[in-house]
Image (cartoon, grey):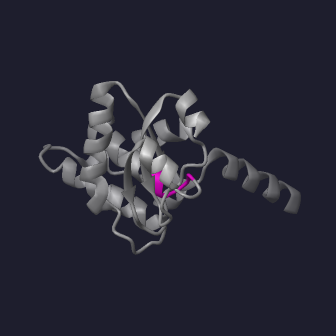
Amino acid sequence: MNLLNELAIKHIISVCDIQLDKEIIDNFNVLWINIDDTLSVDIRKHFDRTNQFLLSCKEKGEKVLVHCQMGISRSSSIVLAYLIKFHHENLTDAYDHLLNRRHIAAPNFGFFLQLIRYEKALNSDKTDNKDSIPTESPQTLLISPAIASSEQENNEVNS
């Protein structure tokens, strides 16, 4: 909790199936999204609420911690939904932006497909949204630079 205070974090979006400690709940504005990190979970139904929460905090100039159990899939999906809606034209750019700041970000395949559909729905008003859908497969987009270099090293060793 000291680190959160040192970083001037006032709000937390907790996207996991474990409730935060009472001390955290009592001292921060917490939005708890109780979901598992599985392919079948509908994370998209939470995007409007989390986007509004993040936007409200941004408008106040206050910092938010978006977290999940491992900081890889659920929290990344929430941040990507926000970036798609408010900062980037497409999921590919949003994902690149996120990877530059959190190299282990990797929404699970089910979440990634929901993000593609979310982006498509947001862009349905536009006359030309074909560039908004990533041309790469979700598997390609989800490989972080660390994993890619590790796979390359393994291939070189096995050759």
Q: Position of residue 60 (x, y in %)?
A: 29, 26
The residue located at (33%, 51%) in the rendering is 133
Where residue 94 appears, x then y in whole percent?
41, 40
Residue placed furthest toward the top? 61
- Can you say whether 46 is above or below 94 in the image? below
Q: Give the vertical position of 158 relative to 14 (above or below).
A: below
User: In this view of the protein, can residue 76 be seen by the observer?
Assistant: no
**25 lies left or right of 132:** right
Residue 74 lies in the magenta-colored region: yes
Q: Which residue is depicted at the point 38% across and 59% down?
A: 33
Query: What's the magenta region?
Result: 71-76
Query: In the rendering, at what x and y percent does residue 118 appear?
Result: 27, 55
Q: Position of residue 105 (x, y in %)?
A: 54, 49
Q: Quadrant of residue 2?
A: top right
The answer to whether residue 52 is seen in the rendering is yes
Q: Quadrant of residue 52?
A: top left
Q: Residue at x 39, y 50 (%)?
A: 78
Task: Specify the quadrant that holds the N terminus.
Answer: top right
